[in-house]
Image (spheres, rainbow, N blue to C red):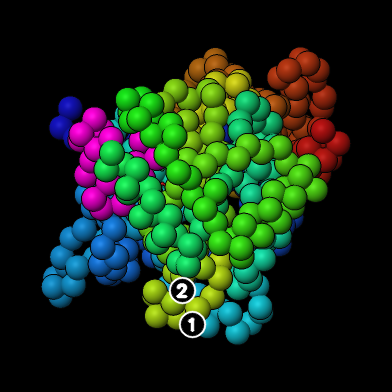
Amino acid sequence: MKFKSVKGTKDVLPEESHRWQAAEQAIRSVMHAFNYKEIRTPVFEETALFARGIGELTDIVGKEMYTFIDRSETSLTLKPEMTASVIRAYIQHNLGELQPLTKVYYLSPMFRQERPQAGRLRQFHQFGAEAIGGPNAEIDAECIALAVAVYEKLGVKNFTLKVNSVGCEKCRPAYKEKLVAFLRGVQDKLSPESRERLEQNPLRVLDSKDEGDNALTRNAPLMKDNLCEECANHFSRLLSGLTSLGLSHEVDGRIVRGLDYYTKTAFEIITGDLGSQDALAGGGRYDLLTAQLGGKPTPAVGFAAGIERLLMVMEKQQLIASNDIRPVLFIAGADDEGRTWARSKAFELRRAGIACETDLLGRSLKAQMREADRQKAQFVAVVGSQELQQQQVTLKNMSSGDQTTVATDNLSAELQHRADSK
Ligand code: AMP
């Protein structure tokens, strides 16, 4: 074969797209129930939006971005995450002036040049939400409840909500020193990746996937035990907020976020059903980002969640979305006159919103009946000159086998009625 999809990208084929649509519909309905409105931003942005010379190493900024120079010599990057784009749009369009708390959600492709494996793609899709404009822990709790509600709505089981606090610009520097001092003591035994992180972004050593690293850092100081008063209060309000919303959660002091604009709340939703790529969603508070992007300081919180991983978990848990995209009626033509009538009747019914199919390949009546079966049409009508002369057709219900005779002029109303009373 001459062309194949690029490594790390995937086609969603016609037979599986209904699963995406069902998930997307559930996501949207939960977002709307929480009064979040959709935001859509371009697929690419100026590279500097994502790589702001923060001096800290993240996997995304370090090596995973799809960056290219366009013909006007501008460096552009396919978005690897959504938060920076949302905040860029928030500042650019003064969204904060419209209301004190801006609540937005998105469904969007993301691009990261990672090593592809099950559950890890180079073009993948995320849904997520951002609540911009408030510092209170109750907003964090609502945002977490929103993420959890999506999984609940889709019937997903076997997931765990883990929460932590990553402190703020006041308490984190002193903690970081403490952590680095501890890590220096075991430096020689750490994995090469963690040794690199120790220099660039020491907090990330704590969420290493290497078991040796985890054993070495078992007694490392944790941010949650070194919070300033404000962060400690925020964290305890978050925990009681989650409890009062009835959301079971675990405190996990090893959950960190990669960038220094993250403050206070950090959370993850993980599943036991996906092997090593077990993170379904991650999020947290990022009170320092808006100012870093040139806006006025504005506290915010949000999360992002993988749609492919959501669908993988749903498949594993056999939460099959039903595929109701199928013709209500298949009109089979018994002769040329019937075929001509079938085409124009199909057009009329389709315009009335009734999903309808007819043969365009000149197939025999038998082959048309097989096709109607394959398409899982609810009803079939066989039409030829005889039926047209009598101005009535026989509607066969394909699941019960029942047959009813309907006047050709009443076909639309009859199908509409049956669809409504289904
Ligand atoms: P992050 O933006 O890295 O916090 O990721 C948030 C969520 O997006 C993760 O929990 C995953 O569910 C999903 N995700 C991140 N990277 C990938 C990827 N390369 N392929 C598929 N899903 C991903």
On the rendered image, what quadrant is the N terminus found in? top left
Vertical position of residue 221 compared to residue 83: above or below: above
The percent position of residue 323, horizontal first and vertical second, equals 62, 30
On the rendered image, what quadrant is the C terminus found in? top right
Lower sequence index among marks 1 and 2: 2
Residues at marks 1 and 2, CA–CA distance in whole angstroms: 7 Å
The percent position of residue 13, horizontal first and vertical second, equals 43, 33
| SS for callout 1 | loop
- Quarter of the image for residue 205 reads top left
| Residue drawn at x 64%, y 50% as measured from the top left | 144
Where is mark 1, residue-wise? 296
Kind of residue sitting beneath label 2: Thr
Kind of residue sitting beneath label 1: Lys
Residue range highlighted in magenta: 186-209
The percent position of residue 332, horizontal first and vertical second, equals 60, 27
| Residue drawn at x 78%, y 16% as measured from the top left | 400
Classify mark 2: residues with Cα within 10 Å, few (<14), some (14-19) or many (20+).
many
The percent position of residue 5, horizontal first and vertical second, equals 26, 36
| Residue drawn at x 73%, y 17% as measured from the top left | 399
Whether residue 241 sits left or right of residue 72 in the image: it is right
Whether residue 357 sits left or right of residue 175 in the image: it is right
Main secondary structure along the magenta-highlighted residues: helix
Q: Is residue 243 visible?
A: yes
Q: Are the residues tagged 1 and 2 within 8 Å (C-beta)? A: yes
Vertical position of residue 281 compared to residue 42: above or below: above
Vertical position of residue 151 compared to residue 31: above or below: above
Where is mark 2, residue-wise? 290
Quarter of the render that holds ligand 1? top left
